[in-house]
């Protein structure tokens, strides 16, 4: 009897420990499923092939003004509710044959024709909505997906890298195809003239994740030809370095701003800065893209940005003044060791600043875009001119995008729309101190001057605006 009792106790204990073990593994499995994945080498492998459409041999349709192509969705012969439908890129010449043999449907896919690249707090939301009011523009699901600069890389922006297919789904291909010109009204060679765009305002300036990713490719076997490929889009001839076996890329002005006096974080981010930016990556895939940049007098822009991004309890002219002075000190400490461009792109410094001082350095960022895209494909506007004459500014945008001129009635309807994303906090907080404004005007003055010279337009010194402040 004692042996039976001992056996039952032992069996009960074993069952208990077995249940605990199985439950622990289940919890571990579930928690790992939803745990954000850090961006290390394994994480980079998940995004290495994202967006390189040339490797997939995609050819954009010649009768669409917008960059579109057909994908073929193949149906399983014995469909099951849990089956996953696979997409396969098929060259246009083979599409109909492939569809008839494999029982597949063609799916129209499109990428943006234009990019409204920035800057934040420069009326880009309002402008983007009014562009989308044009009958030949198909409005995307969201204005700013920030895919090229952030979400395609995953952490820290999203738990997992967002695939290209999800980005493509933001653009309304059916609406682009929904308007077909008749032979009598055919303009140029576009049978389908509708276009769509991406309004992410991080596109102009936030290239740090892209630089880190490209550096990873350059220093592995995956990036043997990446430098040569990226340089194809550059206007100027550049020397091509051998970076595969090198931890530094001095031959192409590589600067690595790591932990130093302006960074007081206990666990600083690495700030890899390369000559290549998001502009190079977009140009590699969409070389005919139309680019629109909207800039605002940088001092006013900075205060608007502060009101928008800072927690409500901290908002005050005094807090803004303190944040500005601290940020300028950190900037000056950085440029004593590195170039202005390196400091402008360095993510460590950006995160250490109390205000987004770097967003107003328009000359640095737009210079990189003009090295990649032809000048006629880049339209640079001032927010002040847009506010002074909405109709005239929209007409210049429509012309830049090759759109039909809006009728007087359509212009009237567009102009009576409410202002989108207007910041009302200034009425509650009040204006910045005069002394703060003076400090910022002196800080931005040389950068505004360089921008005016770069664009050959003295208006971008904002002397007309500064005089009225």
Image (spheres, rainbow, N blue to C red):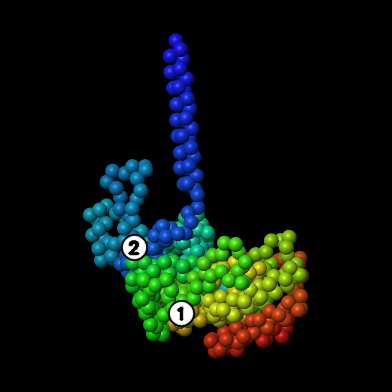
How far apart marks 1 and 2 lie (CA) works out to 40 Å
Residue under the image location 49 percent in, 40 percent down:
27
Kindly identify which numbered label has been placed on residue 70: 2
Horizontally, residue 164 falls left or right of residue 406, namely: left
Q: Is residue 289 visible?
A: no
Q: Is residue 88 visible?
A: yes
- Residue 96 lies, in percent from the top left, at 26, 60
Residue under the image location 76 percent in, 70 percent down:
318
Residue under the image location 47 percent in, 54 percent down:
37
Q: Quadrant of residue 299?
A: bottom right
Q: Secondary structure at mark 2?
A: strand
Which residue does the numbered mark 1 point to in the structure image? 253
- Give the camera-side residue of 310 and 199: 310
Q: Which quadrant is the N terminus positioned in? A: top left
Circle nearer the viewer, 1 or 2: 1
Kindly identify which numbered label has been placed on residue 385: none
Q: Earlier in the sequence, mark 1 or mark 2?
A: 2
- Residue 183 lies, in percent from the top left, at 36, 73
Q: Is residue 460 above or below residue 172?
A: below
What crowding class fits label 2: few (fewer than 14 Cα within 10 Å), some (14-19), or many (20 or more)? Answer: many
Q: Secondary structure at mark 1?
A: loop
Horizontally, residue 367 falls left or right of residue 48, namely: right
Residue lying at the far front of the rendered structure: 2
Residue under the image location 67 percent in, 64 percent down:
310
């Amino acid at each position: 009897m004692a042996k039976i009792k001992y056996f039952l106790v032992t069996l009960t204990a074993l069952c208990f420990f077995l249940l605990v073990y199985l439950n622990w593994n289940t919890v571990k499995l579930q928690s790992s499923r939803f745990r954000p994945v850090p961006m290390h080498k394994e994480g980079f492998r998940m995004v290495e092939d994202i967006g390189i459409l040339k490797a997939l041999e995609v050819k954009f349709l010649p009768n669409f003004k917008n960059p579109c192509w057909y994908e073929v969705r193949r149906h399983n012969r014995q469909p099951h509710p849990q089956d996953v439908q696979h997409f396969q890129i098929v060259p246009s010449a083979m599409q109909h044959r492939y569809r008839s043999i494999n029982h597949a449907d063609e799916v129209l896919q499109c990428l943006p024709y234009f990019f409204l690249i920035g800057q934040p707090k420069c009326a880009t939301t309002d402008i983007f909505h009014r562009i989308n009011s044009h009958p030949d523009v198909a409005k995307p699901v969201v204005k700013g997906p920030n895919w090229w600069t952030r979400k395609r890389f995953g952490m820290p922006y999203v738990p997992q890298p967002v695939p290209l297919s999800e980005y493509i789904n933001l653009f309304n291909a059916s609406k682009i195809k929904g308007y077909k010109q008749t032979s009598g009204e055919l303009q140029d060679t576009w049978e389908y003239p509708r276009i769509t765009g991406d309004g992410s305002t991080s596109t102009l300036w936030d290239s740090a994740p892209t630089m880190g990713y490209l550096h990873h490719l350059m220093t592995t076997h995956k990036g043997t030809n990446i430098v040569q490929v990226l340089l194809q889009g550059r206007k100027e001839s550049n020397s091509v370095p051998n970076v595969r076996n090198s931890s530094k890329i001095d031959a192409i002005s590589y600067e690595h701003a790591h932990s130093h006096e302006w960074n007081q974080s206990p666990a600083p981010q690495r700030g890899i800065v390369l000559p290549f930016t998001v502009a190079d990556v977009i140009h590699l895939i969409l070389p005919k893209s139309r680019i629109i940049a909207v800039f605002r007098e940088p001092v006013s822009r900075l205060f608007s940005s502060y009101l928008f991004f800072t927690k409500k309890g901290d908002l005050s002219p005094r807090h803004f003044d303190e944040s500005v002075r601290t940020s300028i000190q950190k900037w000056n400490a950085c440029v004593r060791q590195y170039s202005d461009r390196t400091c402008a792109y360095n993510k460590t410094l950006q995160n250490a600043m109390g205000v987004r001082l770097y967003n107003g350095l328009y000359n640095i960022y737009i210079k990189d875009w003009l090295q990649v895209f032809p000048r006629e494909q880049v339209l640079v506007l001032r927010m002040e001119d847009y506010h002074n004459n909405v109709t005239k500014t929209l007409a210049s945008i429509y012309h830049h995008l090759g759109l039909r001129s809006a009728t007087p009635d359509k212009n009237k309807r567009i102009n009576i729309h409410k202002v989108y994303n207007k910041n009302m906090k200034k009425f509650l907080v009040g204006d910045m101190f005069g002394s703060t404004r003076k400090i910022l005007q002196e800080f931005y003055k040389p950068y505004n001057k360089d921008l005016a010279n770069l664009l050959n337009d003295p208006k971008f010194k904002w002397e007309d605006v500064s005089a009225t402040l």
